Each structure stands twice: as structure tokens, then as C-alpha cells.
Image (cartoon, grey):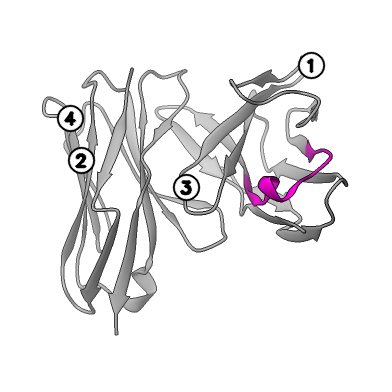
Amino acid sequence: SAVISQKPSRDICQRGTSLTIQCQVDSQVTMMFWYRQQPGQSLTLIATANQGSEATYESGFVIDKFPISRPNLTFSTLTVSNMSPEDSSIYLCSVDKKGYNTEAFFGQGTRLTVV
Amino acid sequence: KQEVTQIPAALSVPEGENLVLNCSFTDSAIYNLQWFRQDPGKGLTSLLLIQSSQREQTSGRLNASLDKSSGRSTLYIAASQPGDSATYLCAVRPGRDDKIIFGKGTRLHILP
């Protein structure tokens, strides 16, 4: 299994500001994933973060808005830049543990409200 | 393109009842399937994972089944309790190195 610590758990931010979300895993993983979950919706993948290379963004998400860092194999950050109320969502960090199975594990989520 | 559907979107049942949540997927060629639980405003907790070669997995009061040929999985919850109230998400992984694909979830409310 994998234990993922995500911080902050929630925040209320002013529009136009930026928030950086941290994700720490208890073991080394190749890829880390960042998701957004808008109110009442399912999860949407924002990007995949690989250590030592730039993140790979899904359609509709850009690096200027959601810059990602991946300095080592156990840590990643996602920044939500120049926030607007439409960015109010839960942001989730995830990893895949590969072994006999490939199993996904998630952090506790960051509940962001932009006012 | 793989699509995952969960029906119903919401469900309310009295405490103590056994219940079944449904998940269907359009492409039977999957690597595995996971069921997650999400409490309001929180992250996802992995409940059960079923490999493509398996028919079912059990954990406590939870039992998940998989019928690949028909593109269906069910999550059976026995003797439901108010603490089971949450959103339950089904996710399919097409291949070992592929990203998982989520359904929209079933919001479950257990009435005391």
C-alpha cells in the first residue's frame, strides 16, 4: 500500500492569488498524479508528474495555470495560479503502486474555495 | 474508448439492509477494477481491487464481483450502517501501465 500526506486539507483564498498544494508519499514512486474534482462531479486528471522531467498535462490544463514540481521520488507540489471562483474544487494527489497488482492510492484531498 | 457508468447516481436505504451498487464498462479488455469510498470533501479510500482474472474480492461486509465478459462489476454491502454513507466510485484500469478511468459515483445515504 501507500500512505499519502497532502497539505493543506482545506483553504479559502482570494481571487487572483495562488495556492501550492503539497503531496508526500511514504515510498518512492515513478509517477504521481494530480486530479481536480469540481463540486458534484467525478475526478478529472490534471497532469502526471514524473521525477526529473516536466509534467504531462491533460487536455484543457496548462502549465501556466497549474505548475507542478517533482523534485524527488516521494514528493510533488501542484500550484493553482491566479485563482478565480471557478477553481473552487477538491484537488487530489494519487500514486500507483506496482507489484502483483497496479493499485491506485489517494491523498486526503485539498478542499479549495476561492472568494 | 473505455467508459465507466455507475447506476444509480444516488441511493437511500434504511440501516441494516443489504445493498448492491453497480458499475458497467464498455470495453471488457481491462487489467483491473477498483472500488473507492469518498467522504464529503475528502480524498478517496481504496476498498477493493479485482484483477481481470478474478471473479470477486471480499473485505469484511464488502464483496465486489467482476464479470468482464458482460462489462459489469457490483459492490455488495451487507448489513448497512449509517457510517457507510459516502460516495462510492468505481474505476477501471485498461492496462497495467494505463491511467485509471472513473465512473461518476453513487452517493449512498444510510437512514438510521
Do callouts 2 and 1 point to residues on the same chain?
no
In this view of the protein, which residue sits in the foreground, B28 or A65?
A65
Q: Chain of mark 3?
A: A
Residue on which disc 2 sits: B73
Measured from the top left, where is residue B81 in percent x and y? 30, 76
Front position in the image: B79 or A48 = A48
Residue type, mark 2 in image = Ser
Q: Are marks 1 and 3 in contact (CB under 8 Å)?
A: no
Q: Which residue is mark 4?
A: B71
C-alpha span from label 2 to label 4: 7 Å
C-beta proximity under 8 Å, tags 3 and 4: no
Q: Mark 4, residues whose alpha carbon is within 10 Å: few (<14), some, or many (≥20)? A: some
Query: Tag on residue A52?
Result: 1
Total marks drawn?
A: 4
Amino acid carrying mark 1 in the image: Gly
For the residues labelled 2 and 3, the Cα–Cα distance comes to 21 Å
Distance between mark 4 and mark 1 Cα atoms: 38 Å
